[in-house]
Amino acid sequence: MAAVAETHAQPTSLVRAFPTRKPASLWSDAWRRLLRNRASMVGLGIIAFFALVALLAPLIAPHNALQYYAGNTFRAPAWVTLPNDPRTGDWRFPLGTDAIGRDVLSRLIFGTRTSMIVGFIPMFIIVSIGTLIGMIAGFAGGRVDNLLMRFTDVVYAFPDLLFIIIMMTALRDTAIGNLLNGLVLLFISLSIVNWVTVARLVRGQVLSLKEKEFIEAAHMIGASNSQIMWRHLLPNSLAPIIVAAAFAVPQAILAEAVLGYLGLGMRPPTDPNSLFPTSWGCMLLEGRDAINAQIWLLLSPAICIATIMLSFTFMGDGLRDALDPMMRGRS
Amino acid sequence: MTQYLIRRILWLVPVLFVISLVTFIIMHATPGGPFDLDPTKTSEQIVKRLEESFGLNKPLFLNTAAFQETLAQSGNWLEAIPQLFDAQFENYLGSLLRGDLGPSYRFRGRQVNEIIFQPLAGRPIWESRIGTTAVLGILALLYALAIGIPLGIMAALRQNSWADHLCLFIATVGYGIPNFVLSIFLIIILAVWLDLVKVIELDYWSRWQPWVLPTIVLGTPTGAFLTRLTRASMLEVMRMDYVRTARAKGLMERLVVLRHMLRNALIPVATYVGPALAGLVTGSFIIESQFLVTGIGRLFVESISRRDYTIIMALTLLYALLVALANLGVDLVYVLLDPRIKLGKRGG
C-alpha cells in the first residue's frame, strides 16, 4: 500500500516542481506590454477618473449645476481674496461662479458626464457599423466590395467637421434635434461621418486574412461563411478595431467642444433634474464671453478638454504599440 | 499610370455631385429660411419677392407643375421636359458647371465668387478671403515643417536617449491638445495675464505680428505629427541594408545621414505635405474665428448662422475638392519620389 502511495506521490510532486504555466495568449501579452507603458497607464488612470466623476457627478458636485445663487455672480476662485469686493473667493464655490451665479466646479463635473457620453456612444455605433460594412466588403469582394468602397469613398471625401456643423445647424429645430437637448443629433452626425475609417481598416484586415491558411482550413472543414466571419475573421481583426475605437472617443469629445464653442452644440436645458445639464463645449462658449470677468470659466473646461485629449492620445498610442509590436513607433 | 490618373480625376465628379446633393438636402430640410433674420423682412410679401428673385420659390428637384403646364399648353414633350428640371437643385448645378457659385442671400447684390475669390478693390489677390486662408495655411505648414523635420531627425538619430523621449513626449502633447484649446491657453497667458499681445487685430496686411499666434496655433498639431512621422520613418530607414552598405564602404556619417537616410526617410513626409496643407486650410475655421482672420473659414462659420445657403454650399464643395486633390497628389508624389511604386496595378 505504502509503495503504491509512493509511486503515486512522485508525479504529483513533479508537477508541483515544474508547474505548467498557462501559455501566454496574444491578449495577455498585449496587456503586459500596455502595463509596462507608463504614459499610457497614466492616461488610462485619468480616463478612469473622469469616467468615475461622470458616473458619480450628483454625489461629488457641491451644488446643482443649474442652481443659481443671487449676489454671487462672477465670484473669483476660492484662493483669490479681493478685499472689499463682493466677488472675492469663497470656499463654497471652489472655482468661482459664472455670469448668473452658478458654481463653476459643479458645472464642470456635470459637463464631464456629457463629454464622456458623447465620446463613448458614437464610438460604439461607429465601431459596429464600420466593422459590419468592412467585413462584408472585404469578405464578399467583387462587386459588393466595389460598391461599398465607392460609398465609403464618398463619405470619406466629406470634410467631417463641416458635415457635422451643417447637420447640427440645419436639423437643430426638428424633432430629432430636440431629443436629449440635441445630443442625439450630435451622436447621429458623428456616427455618419466617422464609421468609414473603421470600415476601411477592417476591410484591409479581412482582405489580407482571407488568403491565410487557417481561413482556407476553415473552408475545408465546411465552416459556413458567417462562422468564418464571426469566429475567425473578427477576432483576428480586433486589434486595429480596438485602436481605432480608442482614437474615435477623443475625436467625438473634441467635436462636441468645437461645436459648443461655436454655439452649435447641445442646448443647455432648464430642468434642474436633467442628466446632462451642461457640457464642456457650452462652458467654453460662456467662458469666452466672460474672459475678462472670470477667467476660470474658460480656463477650467479648456484644461479638462486638454487633459482628456492627452490621456486618450497617450493611451491610444500605448494600445497600438501593445497590440501590434510591429507597428511600434510608427505614427 | 495616365489611365489611373484619369480614372481618379473622373471619380471626383460623382463624389462632388453626391456631396453637393447631400449638403443641399440637409440645408433645405431645415425649418426656416435665409430671410428669417433679414432686416428687410417687413412683410410676407417682401419675403415672397426675395424668394422669387433668388429662385427659391421653385420646387427643390422636379418642377412638375411647370412641366404639366407647358405640356397642357403646347402638347410638346420636347418643350416640356426642360421645364421639369427648372428646379432649385438643377439650376444650382447648371450655374456651378459654368463656374458660377450663385448670388449670396445675405450679402445682398454680391456674388459668392466675388466674396470668396476677390480681394477688396485695388488690393492684391492674396488678400481675398481664400487667399488669406491659403496664406495662413502655408505659413502654418512652413512652421510645422521647420519644427517637425529637424526634431524628428534629431530624435531618431539619438533613439532612446533623453532627448528622444523628450521630443516624443512634446510631439505627443502637441498632437493631442486640440489647436483651439491651445489658442485659448495662449490667449489667456499672453494676452490676459502678461498683456503682451493684442488678440483682436483688424488689419492683417500692414504688419507681420498678427500672423504669429494664428500660425503657431494652427501649425502646432501638424508639426507634432510631422515630428513623429519623420522620427518613425528615419528609424525604419536606419535599419536598411543600403545604410549599412554606405557605412561599410567608409562613407562619412554626415553623408550617410544626408544622402542615404534622409532622402528615403522623407518620402512619407513629402507625401503628407499635400494632405497636411489641405487639412490646415479646411481646419482653420475655428482659429480664424478666434483671431478674426478674414478667411473662408470664418466666412463659413458666419454663413452657417446666417443660413447663407449658397456660400455654405460653395465652401463645402471647395473644401471637399481640396481634400480630394490633396489625396490624389499623395499618389503622384509617391510615384515621383519612389520609382519602385507603380500605380493602378491591382494588389499594389
Image (cartoon, coloured by chain):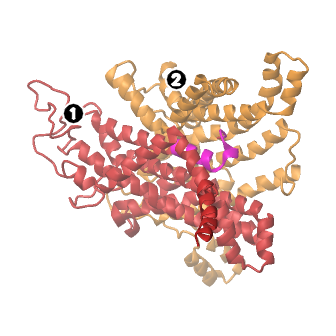
Q: Quadrant of residue B43?
A: bottom left
Relative to the observer, which residue lies in front, A161 or B104?
A: A161
Above or below: residue A79 compared with residue B37: above
Q: Could you tell me which residue is drawn at 36 percent across and 66 percent down?
A: A179
Q: Quadrant of residue A291?
A: top left
Give how far across and how far down residue B305 sits, in percent. Answer: 41, 50
Three-letter residue code for mark 1? Pro
Give how far across and how far down residue B122 sits, in percent. Answer: 57, 27
Residue B275 in magenta? no
Q: Could you tell me which residue is drawn at 56 percent across and 41 percent down?
A: B116
Relative to the observer, which residue lies in front, B157 or A296?
A: B157
- The reply to whether residue B296 is visible in this rendering is yes
Neighbour tally class for label 2: few under 14, some 14-19, many 20 plus, Cα within 10 Å? few
**Residue extending furthest toward the left:** A84
Chain letter, red: A
User: Magenta span covers which residues?
Assistant: A314-330
Q: Which mark is residue B205?
A: 2
Q: Which mark is residue A203?
A: none
Query: Distance between the Cα atoms at labels 1 and 2?
Result: 40 Å
